[in-house]
Amino acid sequence: GGIITQTPKFLIGQEGQKLTLKCQQNFNHDTMYWYRQDSGKGLRLIYYSITENDLQKGDLSEGYDASREKKSSFSLTVTSAQKNEMAVFLCASSLDWGNYAEQFFGPGTRLTVL
Amino acid sequence: GQQVQQSPTSLVLQEGENAELQCNFSTSLNSMQWFYQRPGGSLISVFYNPSGTKQSGRLTSTTVIKERRSSLHISSSQITDSGTYLCAMEHGSSGNKLIFGIGTLLSVKP
C-alpha cells in the first residue's frame, strides 16, 4: 500500500496572490494528477504528469502552473488567486498512464480566497 | 452535455434500507471507478470495475461496458454510509483521464 499527502490542508490567500500546493506519493507511481472540485460541478482535471519530467495540460489548466519535481512529488501553482474563489484541490496518482490504471487520491487542499 | 450522469442526485434512507445508485455514460468507455467521499474528506476508491459485478461487504457494483452504465448497490445501509458517491469513467481514447459525474449525496438517518 501507500499514501498520498497534500500540503497544506487549508490555504487562505488574497486576491492576485500566487499560491502553491504540494503533493507527495509513496506508491512509486509513474503518473500523477491535479483535480479541482467545485460544489455541484464534479472534479475537473487541471494538470497531469505521465512520468517524471513530463507535464500535460488538462481541461482546466488556464490560471495554473504545475511542476513534477521528482517521481514522488507534484506541485500546483495558482498563478493569480481570484477573489471569493473557493474550491478543493485533489491530487491523485496511478501506476502508469495506460488504460485500466486505478487512480488513488490524496486528502485535498481546501482553498479560500478573500 | 454531461458525459457522466449520476442518479439520483441525492437520497435519504432510513438505516437498514437498501440503496441503488446509477451511473450512465454518454460515450464509450474503457473502465470506470466508484468513489466515496465524506464531507470535507478525501476520495476513497470503492470499486475499480472494468466490467461485470464486484462485491465488497455490503456494496455491490455492476458495470455493463457495452451498455455504458454502472450501478452501485448498498444493502442494509448504515449511518456511516452517509456521504457522496462519485462515479468516473476512463474514456475510450483519452488514456487514463477520468471524467467524473457530479455525485449522489446519500444521507442515512437513524
Image: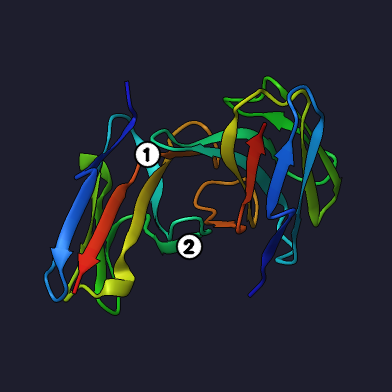
Disc number placed over residue B29 in the picture, else none: 1
Q: Is residue B106 left or right of residue A44?
A: left
Q: Is any atom of residue A81 visible in this view?
A: yes
Residue behind mark 2: B44
Q: Are marks 1 and 2 in contact (CB under 8 Å)?
A: no
Residue at the spot x=28%, y=29% of the render? B26
Up-down: is A26 above or below B68? below
| In front: label 1 or label 2 | 2
**Image-quadrant location for residue A48:** top right
Q: How is the image coloured?
A: rainbow
Q: Is residue B20 visible from the viewing direction of this image?
A: no
Q: Nearer the viewer, residue B40 or A51?
A: B40
Residue situated in front as seen by the camera: A3 or A108: A108
Amino acid type, callout 1? Leu
Between residue A1 and residue A97, name the one nearer to us.
A1
**Secondary structure category for the residue under label 1:** strand
The N terminus of chain A sits in image quarter? bottom right
Rendered residue at 20%/68% (across/down): B109
* Same chain? Circles 1 and 2: yes
Amino acid type of disc 2? Ile
